[in-house]
């Protein structure tokens, strides 16, 4: 029983992007305290062999250097155009380029879902193609956050399918494993207590329409049972600020 339990934990660990994305203003902490939270997250990721730490762009270089000094294989991911996604495409590319220079391994872009909802498909396709090409050219993994809490079920399916179509039209099949569709930022403000992160229903729509692209469920995955169910549905990565809870090492299960 004990060896099996360790096996399950190690399996789940490698799906987890352990996440801290609050700014000092959002958390009420100082810059120094915020960086300490990020460093603690990184220490935890190394200790429990999580796949990645997902952090704000301004911490990438410091954390990449810190991980390198520890000879750690934990990846560094960061967010681009976060969290609204409405940044100009060139601003997103500039932010992504700096993150690449700072050593980021993975880039999680917030797609301009408001432009998509307003029918500006050319703009959305352009930023997808240019952002993905930039990442792939430098050997990075690129994830596209579609913010499912802002979309109807029909829109979730349609936008996911469009990303899959654009990937097929513009990139080689060998690249598909490094182009993710991701559910949520965790910062979208919903009404009436509705979930603002990954839901089983939303993720099922994503998995069903993403073709050969991997899917990341972010936010809302709180328990080991949730994580196991998501993995069984076919997701390839889970973004969470409750990583320890998902491997049964922490009972709080709070946060992103």
Image: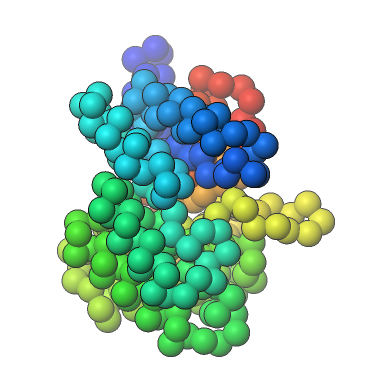
Q: Residue at x 59, y 75 (%)?
A: 114
Q: Is residue 134 above or below residue 246?
A: below
Q: Position of residue 248 (x, y in %)?
A: 52, 22
Residues 103 and 53: in front is 103
Q: Position of residue 129 (x, y in %)?
A: 32, 76
Of the 4 image quadrants, the one containing the N terminus is top left
Q: Position of residue 182 (x, y in %)?
A: 46, 58
Q: Is residue 38 above or below residue 165?
A: above
In the image as oriented, which residue stretches furthest toward the right?
192
In the image as oriented, which residue stretches furthest toward the top?
2
Residues 211 and 198: in front is 198
152 lies left or right of 157:
right
Colour mode of the rendering: rainbow
65 lies left or right of 56:
left
Residue 48 picture quarter: top left
Q: Is residue 216 above or below residue 43?
A: below
Residues 66 and 126: in front is 66
Residues 232 and 43: in front is 43
149 lies left or right of 232:
right
Q: Residue at x 35, y 36 (%)?
A: 63
Of the 4 image quadrants, the one containing the C terminus is top right
Q: Residue at x 41, y 42 (%)?
A: 59
Counting the numbered discs, the total is 0
Residue 93 visible: yes
Q: Residue at x 59, y 51 (%)?
A: 186
Q: Position of residue 39 (x, y in %)?
A: 43, 29
Residue 8 visible: no
């Amino acid at each position: 029983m004990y060896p099996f339990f360790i096996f399950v934990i190690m399996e789940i660990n490698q799906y987890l992007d352990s996440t801290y994305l609050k700014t000092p203003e959002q958390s009420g902490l100082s810059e120094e305290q915020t960086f300490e939270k990020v460093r603690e997250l990184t220490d935890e990721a190394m200790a429990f062999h999580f796949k990645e730490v997902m952090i704000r762009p301004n911490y990438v270089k410091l954390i990449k250097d810190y991980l390198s000094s520890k000879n750690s294989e934990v990846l560094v991911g960061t967010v681009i155009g976060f969290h609204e996604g409405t940044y100009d495409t060139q601003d997103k590319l500039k932010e992504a380029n700096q993150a690449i220079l700072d050593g980021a391994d993975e880039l999680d872009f917030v797609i301009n879902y408001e432009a998509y909802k307003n029918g500006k498909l050319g703009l959305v396709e352009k930023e997808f193609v240019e952002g993905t090409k930039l990442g792939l050219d430098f050997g990075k993994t690129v994830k596209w956050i579609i913010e499912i809490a802002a979309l109807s079920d029909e829109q979730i399916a349609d936008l996911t399918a469009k990303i899959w179509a654009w990937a097929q039209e513009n990139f080689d099949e060998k690249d598909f494993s490094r182009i993710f569709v991701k559910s949520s930022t965790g910062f979208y403000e919903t009404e009436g207590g509705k979930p603002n992160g990954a839901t089983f229903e939303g993720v099922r729509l994503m998995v069903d329409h993403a073709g050969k692209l991997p899917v990341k469920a972010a936010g809302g995955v709180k328990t080991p049972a949730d994580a196991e169910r998501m993995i069984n549905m076919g997701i390839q990565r889970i973004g969470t600020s409750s990583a320890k809870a998902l491997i049964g090492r922490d009972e709080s299960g709070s946060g992103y």
